[in-house]
């Protein structure tokens, strides 16, 4: 049984997220997803996600590619999560290229191409400008 793990915020869920999760799942038999908490987002970006973590987890949990979803409470806990969930492969989008190579001693590390022309930040901008 090969376990794949990935991490993300998945705020304002969109097709770029689906593409990433679908391709990640194809690298193994089951996919575990660490969803970053609201507090972790606030500490990184000084703002909370649009969707709270309970709703973001509910969306991720409802996907057929995803077998388990857990809260990612700190960026520094990646090694712990990989070991705890006995992950064989860590998958991240290529915006993180090279950032997680240090974990190649305990699992395979793969970076996938991001889906072009879609992002949560851009969606927030489009929605907020259409409200003016
Ligand atoms: N993604 C993608 N294509 C897009 C947008 C996002 O492939 N157009 C991928 C990202 O590369 C990432 C995943 O979807 O692998 C989730 O994206 P974000 O929610 O932006 O995740 P992020 O806030 O970068 O993760 O430990 C990492 C943290 O949890 C933060």
Image: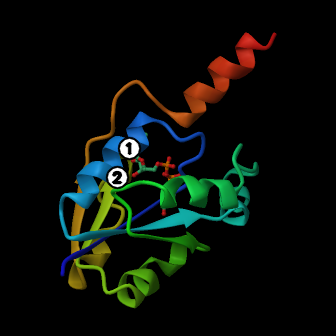
Q: Is residue 42 left or right of residue 32?
A: right
Mark 1 residue element: helix
Quadrant showing the N terminus: bottom left
* Few, some or many residues within 10 Å of mark 2 (<14, 14–19, 20+): many
- Which residue was labeled with disc 1? 18
Label 1 and label 2: CA atoms lie apart by 5 Å
Query: Residue 60 at x, y = what percent?
Result: 50, 56
Q: Is residue 116 left or right of residue 44?
A: left
Query: Residue 24 at x, y = what percent?
Result: 27, 57
Residue drawn at x 59%, y 73% is 74
What scheme was used to colour the molecule? rainbow
Name the disc covering residue 106, or none.
Answer: none
Label 2 C-beta lies within 8 Å of the nearest ligand 1 atom? yes
Q: Is residue 125 left or right of residue 122?
A: right
Mark 2 residue element: helix
* Few, some or many residues within 10 Å of mark 1 (<14, 14–19, 20+): some
Quadrant showing the C terminus: top right
Residue drawn at x 42%, y 54% is 63
Asked whether the residues under the numbered discs 1 and 2 touch, taking CB atoms below 8 Å apart as contact, a structural biologist would say yes
Query: Residue 12 at x, y = what percent?
Result: 59, 39
Specify the quadrant of the image occupied by residue 123. top right
Residue 42 sits above or below residue 101 on the image:
above
Residue drawn at x 36%, y 62% is 99
Query: Residue 6 at x, y = what percent?
Result: 38, 64
- Which residue was labeled with disc 2? 21
Label 1 C-beta lies within 8 Å of the nearest ligand 1 atom? no
Specify the quadrant of the image occupied by residue 41. bottom right
Numbered marks: total: 2
């Amino acid at each position: 049984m090969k376990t794949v793990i990935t991490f993300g915020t998945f705020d304002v869920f969109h097709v770029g997220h689906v593409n990433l999760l679908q391709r990640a799942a194809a690298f193994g038999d089951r996919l575990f997803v660490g969803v970053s908490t609201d507090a972790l987002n606030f500490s990184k970006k000084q703002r909370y996600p649009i969707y709270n973590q309970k709703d973001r987890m509910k969306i991720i949990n409802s996907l057929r590619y995803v077998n388990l979803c857990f809260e990612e409470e700190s960026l520094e806990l990646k090694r712990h999560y990989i070991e705890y969930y006995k992950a064989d492969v860590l998958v991240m989008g290529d915006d993180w290229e090279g950032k997680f190579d240090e974990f190649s001693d305990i699992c395979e590390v793969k970076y996938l191409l991001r889906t072009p022309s879609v992002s949560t930040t851009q969606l927030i901008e489009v929605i907020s400008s259409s409200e003016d």
